[in-house]
Structure formats: C-alpha cells, structure tokens
C-alpha cells in the first residue's frame, strides 16, 4: 500500500508556486497567469510538466510501470507539446489503487481528503497537501474573481458540504478573496431563502437545478425576487445546464451567470470558470487540457469535439497524467474579450459513459444495481427513470419483484419499497423513488440492456 515516501520537492526540487492573496477589490481583476502570452505560458507549462513527469515516475510505481512499458523515460519529456506521448489515467486506475496507492507523498503530508462516486461500491478518493490546498484556493479565487467577488460580498453557498468537493471548494475560495461566506449547504429551501434575504447575499453558489428550485420556492413563498434579494451574480456547476436553463436562472434572479466546471480527480470545482463574456476559461497553468477521440485516444485539433483530458501540472499529493474525464467538450484558443488569453472549453455536452448526474450527485447504473442486488425479493430487471420535476431532477427506479414477493401482498411490497428507498439514500446519497412492478413486465433488450430512461434528454435539457 502506501510506503513512507519523501515529498516530491526533495527528489526533483520542484519550483515553489506563489499564490497571491486577493484583498483589494478590483474591477475585472486579472490573475497574473490569466493573460500571459502563449509563449510564456507554454514555457511555464513545459517546466511544470518536466517536474511532474519526474515526480510521478520516481514516486508512483503505477506511473513508472506504465511509462516503462511504453518505453518513455522521464528525461524524454521536455516540452508541453510532448504530453501526447504520456500514458492516460482512468477512473479504473484510481479504483485499482484505492484508496491511497497513487499518492506521491506519505499521509503525514495530507491535510484534506475528499471522495466522489465510483462505478462500483468503492468511491474515488482524492487527497491534498497544504500546497495543494493553496492551489485549490488560488483557482477558486480566480473563479470568483470572474464576477469581482471580494470584501463586502456575502457568498451564500448551497453546494453540499462534506466529501463532495463543491461545498468546501467554494467555501475556501470565498474566504480567499475576502468575502463573507454563509456555509448553508443544500436542502432546507425555506431557511435558505430567509437567510439569503436577511443576510443580504450578493453571490449565490450552487447547482443550476437547486438554484432554480430556490427561485420557484421564493415565488411560492410570496417573495418579490427583485426587491427582497440583493444577489448580483451566481456560480453554477457540477452538472450540465442547457443555454436555455442558464438564461432562465440569470433572468429569474436578475444575476450574472458564471459557469464553473471541475472534477474531484483534478482538484474539485475550479478547473475552469465562465467569464463575463460567457467563455469557460481553463486554468491551464495548473490543469492542462487536451481533447481526444474517445475510441482511438488520438489528440484532436482545436475546435473539434471529443473527450476532455486533463493533466495536473502542479498538484503534489495526487498528480494525474492525462486523466480521461469522459466529458465531451472542445477547446478554443482565441484570446477573449475579457482580456484572458488562457484557453476556453465548450460547456460539457454530455458524457462518454453512462454516468448520470442527478441534482449534482454522480450516479452510475451499476451502483443502483449494487443496492438492488443486496435486497431479497427482487429480480435483476430494472430501469432508472430520470425526469425534471420543476427545477429538480427526479429519479425513479422501476424494479421487478419476484413471484413470491408479489404474492406476499401490498403490505410486504410497501415494506420492501421503503427499505430500498432508504438504502439508496444511505449508500448513494440520492432520493430515489422506488416503483415495484410485477414480474416479467419490463421490456427485455436483445442486445445491451437499456437501464436508463433519461427524459431530461428528450425534453432537450
Ligand atoms: O462536480 C466538482 C464541482 C463542484 C464542479 C461544484 C463545479 C461546481 P465530481 O463530483 O467529481 O466533481 O463530478 C465531476 O461532474 O466529470 C462532469 O461530468 C460533471 N460536471 C462538473 N461541472 C460541470 C459543468 C464536481 N459545469 C463531474 N457542466 C464531471 C457539466 C459538469 N458537467
């Protein structure tokens, strides 16, 4: 498992990373690395990649083995353009090395651990050193500076706090820029509205679906949204949102909509963020993006759509080479009207695998199946149905019971239903409604089983 290893800088002497602290509110604040010319940026990226490759090769047996197999020595890699010669890393690799097998340092250096859902019962675990936390705070500061968030702002944070990176990621970012953060977390709709109004929140951070739900609830509760609230901007991510949904949220709250993209494996939220022009800038001095053909792994040119892959150029505890996100996007290197020269990515179109995102929570059909198979009285025939109910996603699992259970009558079925619903909540953190159906009533597939009926896609969401 985890050996006691020296920290990377002792081995390869990585250069220190400076994290300026944002205390002074400025209009259109630009972080120094946001608008470098490409030559300078590439030289920073190249230097960081060189150090990264040496670090992972010498400190993580997994990477050494992969690179040796491909015949690549760390000294072969000297420029960012050579990144294409390096191996990919997948979620499966993280799972195979669960929980701490890919760390480059001993647990003595770890100060934070988060995790996100995996395709089986095991979650994906990510860990941060103090320096990594500095990087995360820096990028989250850069995210919030997209709307000049700073002292005087009150950030109402409704991302979930806990193992999910959303809540604490935004929390740290708000503190970094000197704003006052309200660590409200999710749920408790009425209380959220009361606090937002009474504390005078100026910024809201949350999933698009939940913040739209808050607006609908505010109307139902008799609030006058424009008069009662002081919100001026919001930061939304963790799940896809169509252009139409973004506009609806911006209009109903009367705020600027800033998208935020990220994933736990890379850092959490803060991999990229939407500027005033609506372009989703990737903080590519830390997270180097590439677009690849999902089937062949070939790197695609600017503008072409494919799977987005990230390499963490600076992270210490869990650096990752060419992580395959399964998210479909494209890149645009044209300098932006906002002044930033860093690359921007298209909003994520969808995923190259069957992961569902339900109200910001990642769910794989295999996880649902895992829960179902733990409970007696069911057959393995099920369908997951996701649809919109108001602003929120609603997940229903239709599952066939076996003959014996079916003959047991209504009382037994009700007990089984409740048991399954609470297992879903405990194991997967989702509020799923269970619909038990008669044996042999769900459609059988001749080929690959179709487990998901995503009505949101059909509705154009
Ligand atoms: O969702 C981190 C995050 C928190 C991002 C808060 C933004 C705001 P995970 O739980 O590891 O991390 O899930 C990562 O969520 O691979 C995408 O499929 C999806 N995702 C994240 N942001 C967006 C977005 C967080 N803006 C997975 N649009 C990613 C579409 C997104 N999908």
Image: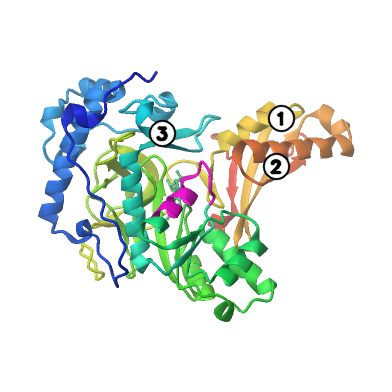
Local secondary structure at mark 1: strand
Q: Residue at x 59, y 71 (%)?
A: 198
Tell us which disc is closer to us: 2 or 3.
3
Residue 348 at least partly seen: no
Q: Residue at x 68, y 27 (%)?
A: 374
> Which dot marks residue 91?
3
- Counting from the top left corner in percent of width and height, residue 356 is at 53, 45
Residue 165 colored in magenta in the image? yes
Residue position marked by numbered label 1 in the rendering: 379
Q: Which residues are magenta?
A: 160-173
Left or right relative to 166: residue 214: right
How many C-alpha atoms fall within 10 Å of the one at disc 1: few (<14), some, or many (≥20)?
Answer: some
Q: Residue at x 42, y 70 (%)?
A: 152
For marks 3 and 1 on the same chain, the one whose residue lies earlier in the sequence: 3
In the displayed orientation, state which residue is furthest to the bottom.
227
Left or right relative to 139: residue 215: right
Left or right relative to 427: residue 65: left
């Amino acid at each position: 498992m985890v050996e006691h290893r020296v920290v990377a800088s002792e081995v390869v002497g990585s250069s220190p990373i400076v994290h300026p602290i944002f205390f002074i509110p400025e209009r259109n604040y630009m972080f120094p690395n946001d608008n470098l010319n490409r030559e300078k940026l590439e030289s920073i990226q190249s230097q960081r990649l060189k150090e990264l490759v040496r670090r992972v090769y010498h400190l993580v047996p997994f990477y050494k083995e992969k690179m040796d197999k491909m015949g690549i020595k760390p000294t072969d890699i000297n420029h960012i353009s050579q990144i294409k010669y390096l191996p990919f890393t997948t979620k499966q690799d993280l799972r195979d090395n669960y929980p701490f097998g890919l760390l480059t340092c001993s647990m003595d250096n770890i100060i934070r651990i988060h995790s996100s859902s995996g395709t089986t019962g095991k979650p994906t675990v990510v860990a941060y050193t103090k320096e990594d936390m500095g990087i995360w705070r820096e990028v989250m500061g850069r995210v919030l500076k997209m709307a000049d968030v700073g002292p005087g702002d009150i950030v109402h944070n409704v991302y979930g706090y806990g193992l999910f990176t959303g809540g604490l990621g935004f929390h740290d970012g708000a503190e970094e820029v000197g704003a006052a953060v309200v660590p409200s977390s999710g749920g408790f709709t009425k209380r959220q509205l009361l606090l937002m109004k009474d504390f005078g929140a100026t910024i809201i951070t949350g999933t698009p679906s939940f913040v739209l739900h808050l607006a609908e609830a505010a109307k139902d509760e008799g609030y006058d949204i424009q008069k009662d609230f002081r919100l001026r901007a919001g930061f939304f991510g963790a799940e896809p949102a169509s252009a139409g949904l973004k506009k609806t949220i911006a209009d109903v709250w009367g705020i600027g909509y800033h998208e935020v993209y990220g994933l736990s494996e890379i850092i959490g939220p803060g991999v990229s963020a939407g500027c005033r022009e609506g372009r989703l800038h990737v903080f590519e001095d830390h997270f180097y993006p590439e677009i690849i053909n999902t089937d062949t792994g070939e790197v695609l040119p600017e503008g072409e759509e494919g799977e987005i892959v990230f390499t963490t150029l600076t992270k210490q505890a869990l650096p990752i080479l060419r992580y395959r996100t399964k998210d479909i996007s494209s890149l645009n290197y044209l300098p932006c009207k906002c002044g930033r020269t860093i690359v921007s990515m298209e909003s994520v179109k969808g995923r190259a695998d069957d992961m569902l995102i339900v109200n910001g929570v990642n769910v794989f059909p295999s996880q649902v199946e895992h829960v179902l198979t733990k409970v007696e009285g069911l057959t393995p025939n099920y369908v997951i149905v996701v649809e919109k109910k108001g602003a929120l996603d609603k997940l229903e699992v239709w599952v066939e019971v076996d003959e014996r259970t079916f003959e047991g009558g209504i009382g037994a079925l009700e007990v089984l239903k409740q048991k399954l619903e609470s297992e879903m909540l405990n194991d997967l953190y989702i509020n799923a409604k269970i619909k038990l159906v008669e044996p042999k009533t769900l459609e059988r597939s001749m080929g690959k089983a179709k487990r998901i009926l995503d009505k949101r896609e059909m509705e154009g969401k």
